[in-house]
Image (spheres, rainbow, N blue to C red):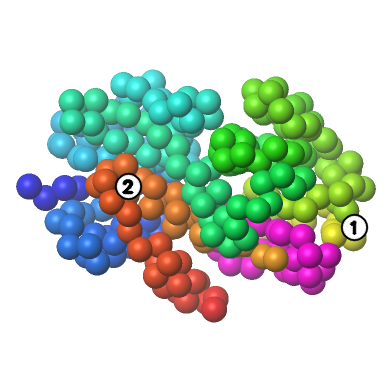
């Protein structure tokens, strides 16, 4: 029987996930389809019940449902439970709905694909303390990164993540700006640079160290103001497209038990978004 998968969100028309997953199914000869489904917050519970009734094998979850979907699932993966957010739902062989979060692990795969694993003991600055930063922080810690600092405008939000991790430290944006030269890896997780967001940098990069690694989770545009400014300082650049593709690949692995071709997809989407 043909498998079917979906992505739910509000809005959802902008998602590139259907294009990506359907291309992977075609390439692998998998008899499956992946569709976008617009779900308003007030219809989330009914949508989950409908998916279960109609026999979906799994689905992805995007804004604004990543937290609110949890009460409607049967169980959570350990990382999703720590993060308090789900972006992938798997229907198990027993018919249960299990929630995972592949965002953080997708980021770590993307980062290490670009720069290797040799930087895990280097000082790392995570910029922002929202849901994405939270997932990335836990995934970095799980992967063995030992020197994580989180900078946020509201330091208490960054401190809350640090307290849960029981490691690292929280600082203000002002302190981050004055101590930039002490970090080797920078991970920008705020909406700064999104095509629909705020183009202001979180802080001045005047003290940005030469030869550092600069990553941004935004993939449209591929080169955000943060990455452009860091590149001018001689940084190794990691854009957000790899995270997007790898988080999708991990969901694919949960659903189908095999790995899709991520390199070809990154190249294809890079060209589609006007990059090289």
Mark seen at residue 174? none
The tag earlier along the polypeptide, 2 or 1, is 1
Nearer the observer, 219 or 265: 265
User: In the picture shown, does residue 244 fall above or below 270?
Assistant: above
Q: Left of 222 or right of it: where is 172? A: right
Taking the image as shown, residue 120 lies to the left or right of residue 56, namely right
Where residue 247 sits in the image (x, y, percent)?
44, 49
Which residue is rendered at x = 25% and y = 47% of the image?
Answer: 256
Q: Is residue 92 magenta?
A: no
Magenta stretch: includes residue 224? yes
Residue at the spot x=82%, y=68% of the render?
233
Quadrant hosting residue 209: bottom right
Which residue is at the far left? 1
Q: Nearer the viewer, mark 2 or mark 1?
A: 2
Q: Would residue 16 be seen by someone viewing this image from the given angle?
A: yes
Q: Which image quarter holds the C terminus?
A: bottom right
Q: Dot 2 surroundings within 10 Å: few (below 14), some, or many (20 or more)? A: few
Residue designated by label 1: 207
Spot occupied by residue 212 in the image (x, y as percentages of width and height): 77, 60
In this rendering, the answer to whether 153 lies above or below 192 is above
Label 2, secondary structure: give it. helix
Question: Left or right: where does residue 58 sit relative to residue 249?
Answer: left
The magenta region covers: 210-235
State how far apart marks 2 and 1 are (Cα): 41 Å
Left or right: 245 in relation to 132: left
**Res. 49 in view:** no
**Mark 1: which secondary structure?**
loop
Residue where numbered disc 2 is placed: 253
Q: Where, by quadrant of the figure, is residue 42 drawn?
A: top left
């Amino acid at each position: 029987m043909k498998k079917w998968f979906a992505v739910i969100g509000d809005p959802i028309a902008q998602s590139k996930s259907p294009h990506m997953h359907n291309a992977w199914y075609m390439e692998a000869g998998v008899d499956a389809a992946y569709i976008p489904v617009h779900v308003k917050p007030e219809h989330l519970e009914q949508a989950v019940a409908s998916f279960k009734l109609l026999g979906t094998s799994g689905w992805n979850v995007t804004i604004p449902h990543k937290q609110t979907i949890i009460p409607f699932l049967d169980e959570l993966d350990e990382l999703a439970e720590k993060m308090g957010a789900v972006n992938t739902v798997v229907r198990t062989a027993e018919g249960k709905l299990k929630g995972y979060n592949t965002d953080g692990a997708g980021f770590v795969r993307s980062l290490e694909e670009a720069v290797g694993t040799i930087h895990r003991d280097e000082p790392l600055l995570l910029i922002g303390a929202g849901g994405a930063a939270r997932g990335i922080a836990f995934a970095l810690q799980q992967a063995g990164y030992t020197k994580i600092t989180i900078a946020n405008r509201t330091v208490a939000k960054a401190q809350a993540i640090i307290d849960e991790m029981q490691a690292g430290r929280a600082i203000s944006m002002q302190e981050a700006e004055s101590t930039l030269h002490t970090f080797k890896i920078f991970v920008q997780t705020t909406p700064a640079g999104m095509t629909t967001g705020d183009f202001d940098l979180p802080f001045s990069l005047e003290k940005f160290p030469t030869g550092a690694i600069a990553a941004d989770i935004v993939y449209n545009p591929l080169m955000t103001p943060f990455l452009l400014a860091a590149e001018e300082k001689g940084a190794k650049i990691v854009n957000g497209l790899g995270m997007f593709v790898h988080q999708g690949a991990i969901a694919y692995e949960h659903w189908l038990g095999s790995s899709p071709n991520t390199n070809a997809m990154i190249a294809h989407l890079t060209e589609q978004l006007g990059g090289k």
